[in-house]
Image (spheres, rainbow, N blue to C red):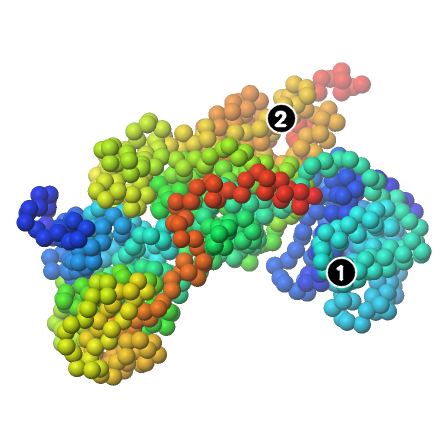
Amino acid sequence: MKQITATNDFVVKFANVNGSGSASANELFARSILRMGVPVSPRNIFPSNIQGLPTWYEVRVNETGYQGRRGGVDMMVAMNPQTWDKDIKEIDAGGYLFYDSSKLLPKSKFRDDVNVIGIPLTEICNKTYSDPRQRQLFKNIIYVGALSALLDIDPAEIEKLFTEQYKGKEALLQSNFKALKLGRDYALEHLSCPLGIRVKRANNVGDRIFIDGNSAAALGAVYGGATVCAWYPITPSSSLAESFISYCQKLRKEPETGKARYAIIQGEDELASVGIAIGAGWNGSRSFTTTSGPGISLMNEFIGLAYFAEIPVVLIDVQRGGPSTGMPTRTQQSDLLSCAYASHGDTKHVLLFPEDPTECFEMSAQALDLAERLQTPIFVMTDLDIGMNTRLCRPMVWDDTKAYDRGKVMTYDALEAGADFGRYNDVDGDGIPYRTYPGTHPQHGAYFTRGTTKDKYARYSEAGPDYIENVTRLLRKFETAKKLVPQPVLHKAKEPARFGALYYGSTSPAMTEALDALAEQGIHVDAMRVRGFPFAAEVKEFVMSHPGTFIIEQNRDAQLKTMLVTEEQINIDRLISVLHYDGTPITARFISDHIAKHIAAHTVVPMKKAAS
Amino acid sequence: MTYIAKPKLHHPALTKNSVGYTRRDYEGKISTLCAGCGHDSISAAIVQACWELDIQPHRVAKLSGIGCSSKTPDYFLGNSHGFNSVHGRMPSVLTGANLANRELIYMGVSGDGDSASIGIGQFAHAMRRGINMVYIVENNGVYGLTKGQFSATADKGSKSKRGIVNSDEPLDMIGMALLLGATYVARSFSGDKKQLVPLIKGAMEHKGAAFIDVVSPCVAFNNHAGSTKSYEYVRQHNEAVNRLDFIEEREEITADYAPGEVINLTQHDGSVMRLRKLSEDHDPTNRIKTMNYVQEHAAKGEVVTGLLYIDPSAVDMHEHLNTVATPLNQLTAKELCPGSKALDRINASLR
């Protein structure tokens, strides 16, 4: 039988039951490979449920460092009888099936073209442990032990990880060592190790870190100086707020008193959460809320108020599938339009698109600066794929010399000196007015904050010309934002390219790999990663410099394309959509197949060459 | 209602309070509400209370939702920051503002539609959190700005101006505030300034969630026979349980009262509130009994007014959250940013 052979380039998928404690064992497996200097990119595929439903953990091992989902499975660790048939089908021919052989299964349950590796996990567990919970938890560690032998993972690395994790908990440490050894010894004794797919020590991890986007964004908010966070639990953004809580507890206590230099409120709903963040922003605190699509829908009225009243606030949207029970544990980039034009009236908002956890860190911090500079809501558009999966990425960096940009705030001294204060008066021509914090000065600087019925001195006015002056100024401000948002990143093809490709956010790792794959086929495509909205001038220039530009998105309706056509007046015929929206992360194969097919169909091949 | 601009010049002989302001310094813009509107009397009571308390106007932040009542913050304390937010959501905005700067005084002004109908959720949760604020509901049982629809506090059986009888149970905001943990709960009547001003002062000095339900008749849409929120009806059914005399800073109590008639309530800052009891069987420091008392009298058709409940030792949201004494909006990068060295350590732990 064919056996897939591959060193440092394969996919292992774990099929588990959720609530069984498999998540930490699987992460241990992924980390041990990282410690051997080989990049991995794991992905959780999980149900909206706490216990009993199927859950998968897909680990891509790739020495080159490609971190997008590859597609295909070289080894299935089938620990869930409920999904057995489907899981078996997924294995590539010549791949490996790792399963618990304690109970005899009929031959019909297996495939002829797959290498079967049976280990009596339950039997080993039952012999060793009497406590049912221990049997369950250590079963996971035993399979990690067996896999270490089968895939040639250095057990010393796993033991080191245990030592770090269970510092000071000697009993727990020893029992984990024991379970690991049980699995490893069984495999070494009974099976031929290692398999055709294996890990070989390399040096391709470098100083990169392994972190999920939600934790990184939370840390960005800590570093960026957010003092007020209000949130409402919603998958996949809850862990962001929870990370903010735990980072604040560690990093934001007043040393002398132990008191909190932050305030976090779990709101009664998303309306209250964004309302609290807006109240805090109005009163001069850096504030944010974190949510997902359904929360954005609920926040809509408030977002409009913050836009027109010009209140700094940051919204981190960890995007997922649709409303209600709609795919809350699946990833998408489907909130672009609902965020870019959130609320009633003529509104437009600033969006930032991080590609990975490191950019989640950077952009969350930057969003707090931008919110105060532009006095408007800023959206950080991350998604489940970045937010809830641990990813290998650049270390986070902070420049200690950089001060927070608190924007245009009129001080007591300026007011005392007699400065003319018009809350909505564009004195600098950039569309951004000055604001005052409540309580600044006894006689000057107070104003009444309201929606749109006002003149530039914040006096009540329903007059048309005042309204027009105000909303036109807001457009000037949006123009200013173009230069302040993160600028696009250009990846020029090695050879002259007829086609361009625009992409953003979590599509990034798959795109990088797709570009390499296409180049290998002789298809050269210039690529630009969009990092902010409103679009920087370069985005339109890029589109206009190619006869055709692919726009790769993870939504059904080509939302970024719609924004490009609307905002930049680009002829829609120049833009070719590549859309992936089944809830799984986009793959390099999907992108390169679509681009290659399109280009082949639209390339005129000279007769002579075609004939030869 | 008037279109004449208020003269900016004040009479030089106007009395100044201890921080140097005359009563007129606490006024705002000219009201655009209907002549005789109860809400204007409440605005006047707020002006009076702030002046008497020697509060600097700019140290107050006024927040409101949407509706007639929510327009009023423009008509008092013209040197305070105001925020006319969205319908029913003032409590969350006030919560955030309070988190950002614990040193200001927060006054939330709302109506029965704004708080009891669309905003009942935020009202409830703001009370639960114990936000240090004065939350005034200007309660007229009707939507004034949209011309006369019932609100959720309209009594069952009361009649609208168009003759429709309300068949829904009224929402009892006093009962809810008591249940949800407000630590200062009062009811008053816009037509009784003598009762209202001390109640507002007491609420402003109280450290915690202070709620005042002020029955405030709508002269345009809810002041007719058959209404239970009309001037006439409220005057007839008003049952005051006590009179609050607000006393500055440990001032010696000199007046003579018969024992049992007066309760002295020492506040967290040492100030004393003196409550003259008008009803023998009401104890304003007992929450459970107060709930019963209010319900029993409501069943008799009486509108119980006065300081209904107070917990003088209340603590507020900032204490629950254990936030630093410095207002959060005054913290700088020095206090907030852990710096690159700490980040290097975090990076190292993620490898």
The residue at the point 55 percent across, 24 percent down is: A542
Quadrant for the C terminus of chain A in the image: top right
Q: Nearer the viewer, residue A331 or B194?
A: B194
In the rendering, at what x and y percent does residue A142 appear?
Answer: 82, 59
Mark nearest the camera among 1 and 2 is 1
- Sequence-first tag of 1 and 2: 1
The residue at the point 71 percent across, 55 percent down is: A167
> On residue A20, which mark appears?
none
> On residue A170, which mark appears?
1
Above or below for A418 versus A195: above
Above or below for B133 versus A535: below
Question: Which image quadrant for residue A580?
Answer: top right
Q: Chain of mark 1?
A: A
Residue underneath mark 2: A491
**Relative to residue B107, is residue A219 drawn left or right?**
right
Regarding mark 2 in the picture, which secondary structure is present there? strand
In the rendering, at what x and y percent does residue B206 appear?
Answer: 30, 63
Q: Amino acid at mark 2?
A: His
The residue at the point 48 percent across, 25 percent down is: A537
Q: Chain of mark 2?
A: A
Answer yes or no: is residue A371 visible: yes
